[in-house]
Amino acid sequence: MASPGGGTVCNGKLHNHQKQSNGSQNGNHKRNGIIRETQQNGKPHVYSKPFVESFEEVPMVVAILTYLGYGIGTLFGYLRDFLRNHGIEKCNMAVERKEQKNFVPLYQDFENFFTRNLYMRIRDNWNRPICSVPGPTFDMMERVTDDYNWTFRFTGKIIQDVINMGSYNYLGFAENSHESLTTVRNSLKKYGVGVCSSRQEMGNIDKHEELENLVAQFLGVEAAMVFGMGFATNSMNIPALVGKGCLILSDELNHASIVLGARLSRATIWTYKHNNMQSLEKLLREAVIYGQPRSRRAWKKILILVEGIYSMEGSIVRLPEIVALKKKYKAYLYLDEAHSIGSLGSRGQGVVDYFGMDPNDVDVFMGTFTKSFGAAGGYIAGRKDLVDYLRVHSHSAVYATSMSLPIAEQIIRSMKSLMGLDGTTNGIQRIRQLAQNTRYFRNKLNEMGFIIYGNQESPVIPLLLYLPSKVAAFSRILLQRKIGVVVVGFPATPIIEARARFCMSSSHTKEMLDTVLKEIDEIGNILRLKYSRHKKSARPELLDEKSFELED
């Protein structure tokens, strides 16, 4: 998950005397006031600008305390289960009926154990009922519990103007202003809400065709097709592209929709270390040399599955290096841009735009409209023959109800804004504001001494909390101060890497970000969350000895 030695990764090098994360050196490094061009395998760097990512290692004391916290919670869980089994404490969880006692258990024991004894204690931090547009601020229905989070009741009060730091509203298109939604409202009046048919039957509407042409134009590819659900775009299309006798090379931190699609395909799945090019090349080399197990026949197809931005780590895929490996070993590349489309690149066209690469270098583009476009659904894009093939063989295209037309119109208006087809510069301004907010917020958290993960350009900013008790306290205190955040822990993350995940938006004002930073700084002192051991110096180029290189 993190770089082996912790610290900051800049173009593959760690700035804390630790070993390199990928063994490759790319981009320009500034050392002792001199900018040097590094090389990879004797060739010039593949990055046109510095590629800086940070994955600082957890302090040993914090790791021990985190394991100890989960251990104590587990012991008390077993004690409470003993009390429940003997009728001393009431059990509120779903259990098998007495007459089914000798049946094979319907509910998995460990998952239930974790839910009822650990998750339930802090369940109030999730599934909070929002009752407004999830823009830069939102309103939330107040709820309380009388039985330690087993059930909730609403008080009838509304918590207003909570600063939203958790929604994927990267470009602020999740909005309800009268002027901006005129075309969506007109589409609703003309088409209604539901389509009630699949694309292959009576559900292929002119708006769908318009949207697909616009997506292809936006991405700079030949063709695209859209789907009503982002998750199903991955899980139902990957099985149509590969099958038995094919090999999938998947990043170990890929999204659950990619994992499900890979498993449904019946292809052989090998995972490589996150964003680690040595690990990926090793698997590619073995796949080409040895072929399929036992038979040693060549693989029918080798497909590399990656994401543009990894939503739990905030890291950006090393696309130039992966494309180089893909070409070297004659593999195919499937790029999931759910979080990167709209949020990366000078024109918001994702990681290909961010790295200044040719769209033809990627075989299959996948993305969703649920984040940067403030809508729903997803797309697959690429060559026309690929899209034509999927129109016939994709389960999501053949059996699923087609996208709602007001949703399609919302995507069209957002995408036209980014492309400048609405006659304004509003879209470009949103992209620039998002980048500015991202850099500002990340830099401030770094200066405060928090451990944050990810790339300096990524709008997904994980702040490491580690201890489960601090996860709950951090979220609850921020809500009391009218700030809404998303906190994530095991099993969605490794057990010692629980975190808060901030998502930047172009609609956040500097005043909002300053308010959030002030509260986070104060809470960080109260809960002792400032674990970073890499303090910034006032003049890092001269005083930060970690950036020095000794000459022979």
Image (tube, rainbow, N blue to C red):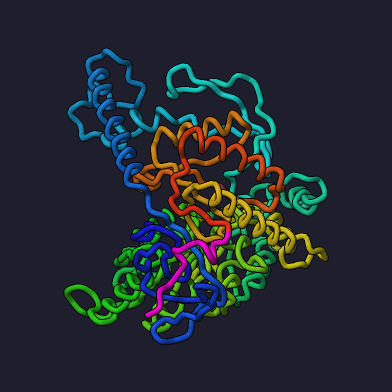
Lateral position of residue 25 relative to residue 405, left or right:
left
Total of numbered circles in the picture? Answer: 0
Residue sticking out furthest to the top:
88
Bounds of the magenta span?
Answer: 539-552
Please report the residue visible at 45 percent of the width from the left and 49 percent of the height from the top: 532
Please report the residue visible at 38 percent of the width from the left and 53 percent of the height from the top: 57
Residue 548 within the magenta-colored segment of the rendering? yes
Q: Quadrant of the C terminus?
A: bottom left
Lateral position of residue 312 relative to residue 165, left or right:
left
The foreground one among 260 and 356 is: 356
Please report the residue visible at 29 percent of the width from the left and 67 percent of the height from the top: 268
Q: Is residue 392 above or below residue 260?
A: below
Can residue 354 be spotted in the picture?
yes
Please report the residue visible at 29 percent of the width from the left and 36 percent of the height from the top: 68
Q: Is residue 534 above or below residue 226?
A: above
Q: Position of residue 454 (x, y in %)?
A: 49, 57
Q: Position of residue 468 (x, y in %)?
A: 39, 36
